[in-house]
Image (cartoon, rainbow, N blue to C red):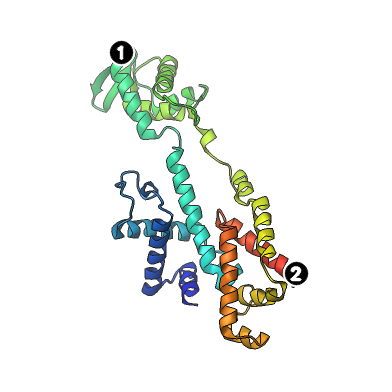
C-alpha cells in the first residue's frame, strides 16, 4: 500500500518527494474538510476560510517538524500497515487540537508583555536617568546610591512572595505594578532597566498554566470512550468476517486482498468490500484524540476481535 509506505518513510526519516507530495495533499484535504482555523498556523495569518497552497505548505512543514522532533511515529511498528494512514490522521488531529487549545488559552503573561507593561508604569510613576551602562530607574528622583550587581539583586528579590497569574486573570497591569513596587521597596536604590524587566517577570507564578507530564499522560487515553467505541464496532460486525479483519488489518504479515480471498475461498471484490466497510465502521466510531490513544485503541480492538474469532 503506497500511502502506508509514505508514512513509514516519514517515520524512518527518509521521505521521498512522492511521499512528501502525498502528505501535503492529505494535510490540505483535512484542513479544508474540517475547516480548521488558520490561527493554528500563525496568529497573524489572514482569516479567509480556505487555505491557499502557501499556507498549506507552511503548516505541513510545522507538522512534520513536530512529528520528527517529538518522535510521534516511533510506534509505527506496532501499527498494522493497512491501518497506518488512519493512525497518522490521529496525529494530525491531536496536533491541531493542541494548537487550537494553545491559541484559545494563552499561556499567561509573556516576557514581552511584562516588559511592555513595566515600561508603561515606570514612565508613569518612577524616575529615570541615562548612564554609560544604560537607563536606571528609581522610585525617587535621587540617584546617589550605587547600583547593585545582578547577583545581589537576585538574592534579595528571591525572598519576595510570587504573584499568581491564572487563566482567570483578566488584567495584568495591577500585578505588574505590585511586582515593581515590591522590587523597588526591597532594593531601595536605583536599578538598571533590563534588571527590572527580568526581576519583575520572575516574580509571577504561572504554574497553573503548566500541565505536569504525569497529568498529561494520565489524560491522554480516554479509556471509557475507547471501550464504548469498541463495543459499538463489534456490534456491527458479522462474527464470520472477523478472521478476515484480523488477517488484513492485524496480521504481522502484510496480507494482500488476493491472498485473503484465496485463503477463505471468496471473491477478491468481496474482501475489498468487507475491509472497506470495516474501516468505515471504525472511522465513524472513534477518532482518537492523540497517538497514544490511537495505539491503545488498536491494541484493545485487536485483542477483542481475537477473543471473538
Q: Give the residue drawn at x 63%, y 88%.
A: 262
- Expressed as whole percent of the image width and height from the top left, the position of residue 226 reads 65, 55
The answer to whether residue 77 is visible is no
Left or right for 200, reference 238: left
- Expressed as whole percent of the image width and height from the top left, the position of residue 130 reads 23, 22
- Expressed as whole percent of the image width and height from the top left, the position of residue 207 reads 53, 34
- Expressed as whole percent of the image width and height from the top left, the position of residue 67 reads 47, 59
Above or below: residue 220 compared with residue 25:
above
Above or below: residue 46 compared with residue 229:
above
Left or right for 198, reference 273: left
Local packing at callout 2 (Cα closer than 10 Å; few below 14, some 14-19, many 20+) is: few
Q: Secondary structure at mark 1?
A: loop
Tell me the residue that label 2 is attached to. 308
Tell me the residue that label 1 is attached to. 144
Above or below: residue 39 compared with residue 200:
below
**Disc 2 versus disc 1: nearer the observer:** 2
Q: Give the residue drawn at x 56%, y 62%.
A: 283
Q: Secondary structure at mark 2?
A: helix
Nearest to the observer: residue 273 or residue 183? 273
Amino acid at each position: 500500500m503506497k500511502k502506508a509506505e509514505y508514512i513509514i518513510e516519514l517515520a524512518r526519516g527518509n521521505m521521498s518527494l512522492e511521499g512528501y507530495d502525498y502528505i501535503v495533499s492529505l494535510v490540505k484535504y483535512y484542513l479544508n474538510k474540517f475547516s480548521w482555523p488558520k490561527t493554528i498556523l500563525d496568529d497573524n495569518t489572514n482569516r479567509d476560510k480556505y487555505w491557499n497552497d502557501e499556507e498549506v505548505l507552511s503548516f505541513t512543514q510545522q507538522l512534520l517538524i513536530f512529528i520528527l522532533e517529538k518522535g510521534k511515529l516511533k510506534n509505527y511498528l506496532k501499527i498494522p500497515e493497512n491501518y497506518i494512514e488512519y493512525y497518522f490522521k490521529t496525529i494530525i488531529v491531536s496536533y491541531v487540537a493542541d494548537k487550537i487549545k494553545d491559541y484559545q488559552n494563552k499561556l499567561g503573561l509573556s516576557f514581552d508583555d511584562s516588559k511592555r507593561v513595566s515600561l508603561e508604569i515606570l514612565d508613569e510613576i518612577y524616575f529615570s536617568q541615562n548612564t554609560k551602562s544604560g537607563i536606571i530607574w528609581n522610585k525617587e528622583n535621587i540617584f546617589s546610591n550605587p547600583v547593585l550587581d545582578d547577583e545581589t539583586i537576585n538574592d534579595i528579590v528571591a525572598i519576595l512572595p510570587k504573584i499568581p497569574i491564572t487563566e482567570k486573570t483578566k488584567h495584568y497591569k495591577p500585578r505588574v505594578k505590585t511586582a515593581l513596587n515590591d522590587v523597588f521597596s526591597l532594593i531601595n536604590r536605583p536599578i538598571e532597566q533590563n534588571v527590572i524587566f527580568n526581576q519583575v517577570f520572575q516574580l509571577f507564578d504561572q504554574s497553573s498554566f503548566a500541565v505536569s507530564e504525569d497529568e498529561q499522560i494520565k489524560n491522554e487515553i480516554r479509556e471509557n470512550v475507547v471501550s464504548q467505541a469498541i463495543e459499538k464496532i463489534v456490534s456491527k460486525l458479522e462474527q464470520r468476517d472477523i478472521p478476515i479483519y484480523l488477517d488484513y488489518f492485524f496480521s504481522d504479515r502484510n496480507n494482500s486482498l488476493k491472498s485473503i480471498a484465496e485463503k477463505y475461498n471468496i471473491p477478491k471484490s468481496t474482501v475489498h468490500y468487507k475491509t472497506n466497510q470495516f474501516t468505515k465502521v471504525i472511522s465513524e466510531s472513534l477518532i482518537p484524540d492523540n497517538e497514544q490513544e490511537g495505539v491503545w485503541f488498536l491494541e484493545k480492538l485487536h485483542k477483542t476481535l481475537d477473543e471473538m474469532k
